[in-house]
Image (cartoon, grey):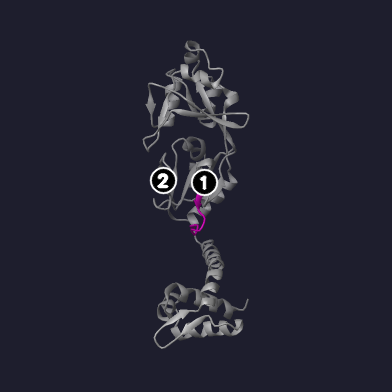
Amino acid sequence: MESGSLQGLIALQKLGELGTFRRAAQALGVSPSAMSQAIKQLESRLGVQLVSRTTRSTKLTAAGERFVGQITPALSDISFAMDEVRQTNLAPRGILRLNLSRISFPMLMRPLLREFLDTYPSLQLELHFDDTLQDIVRGGFDAGIRPGELTARDMVAIRMTASHRYVITGSPAYLERNPPPMIPSDLKDHECVLFRYASGTVYNRWELEAAGQVQTVPVRGQLILNDPYLMIEAAKQGIGLIHVPEAAISQNLRTGQLQLVLEEFALHSPGFFLYYPRRKQMSVNLRVFVDYLRRHQIDV
């Protein structure tokens, strides 16, 4: 494509967006006459009138409107790519804001923090812990970290961990006092520590998996908490069974503080992902973090 054609495409798209040569030219930082000339040259190359010009108004013709609709996505991609390339020469500085669930921190961020902050001393990292599915764009966050099944489809998602299981576990003391459940329906006879989401909903219907099919099992319990790591502490004290990512209790399983039950019914999860808006320009701060993650993918 000739440079003149690209200038004409950009001028036409901006005219269609803003409606007048004056406003479009101002947005592009050129004179109205230069912009009009670029569009005329484009019309000449295509042999089609794209703009209807009168002494009172200027507007796109029907062909011009269709053409602008077709070229706008491609021009957006070009602009997006150029902005990203410009940022490659910038040094990371300022703040990087991440929104993540509480349970993901010890598994994912704690092992990375010290080296990442030492590598980028001019960067300030803010971690906002949130167990809702907050809109990260509206909240002003650069990215979020959530399990893959909770990541919105219109986001770019980058794997942080391998897939893992959601398991049911209890302390040896609890399981000595209470016969371990052998099938999911046995959970009705057990004390379970329940989780309350920030939305107010209590997670009292646990999801299990059998032969690739997910089943929901109602559970009960005297204790309700809104922090998954307090739930783990409660389970270690023998208060009841809990349902959590296996990676969150791996150390407790190794030391024997907790034991798995109904292991054959563990629910499989795709793992944790970092996600960010697909059409939002990636800041240099987020880019260095993404590159860092790709070099240090955690296998939990």
Tell me where residue 230 sits by quadrant.
top left
Q: Is residue 162 magenta?
A: no
Name above or below for residue 133 compared with residue 192. below
Residue type of the residue flagged with mark 2: Gln
Q: Main secondary structure of the magenta part?
A: loop
Residue type of the residue flagged with mark 1: Leu
Query: In the drawing, what numbered circle is on residue 274?
Result: 1
**Which residue is pictured at 58% across the width and 42% down the height?**
297
Name above or below for residue 80 compared with residue 204. below
Farthest-out residue, front: 62
Q: Where is residue 278 drawn, in percent x and y?
A: 52, 55
Q: Where is residue 202 drawn, in percent x and y?
A: 40, 31
Residue tagged 2: 134
Relative placement, left or right, of 262 versus 177 is right
Relative placement, left or right, of 16 versus 159 is left
Residue 290 vs residue 208, the one in the foreground: 208
Q: Secondary structure at mark 2?
A: loop
Q: Secondary structure at mark 1?
A: strand
Asked whether the viewer can see residue 105, the reply is yes
Whole-number angstrom distance, CA of label 2 to CA of label 1: 14 Å
Relative placement, left or right, of 122 versus 253 is left
**Which residue is pictured at 56% across the width and 51% down the height?**
291
Q: Quadrant of the C terminus?
A: top right
Q: Where is residue 242 drawn, in percent x and y?
A: 47, 25
Residue 69 vs residue 172, the one in the foreground: 69
Asked whether the viewer can see residue 119, the reply is no
Q: Which residues are magenta?
A: 274-283
Farthest-out residue, top: 177
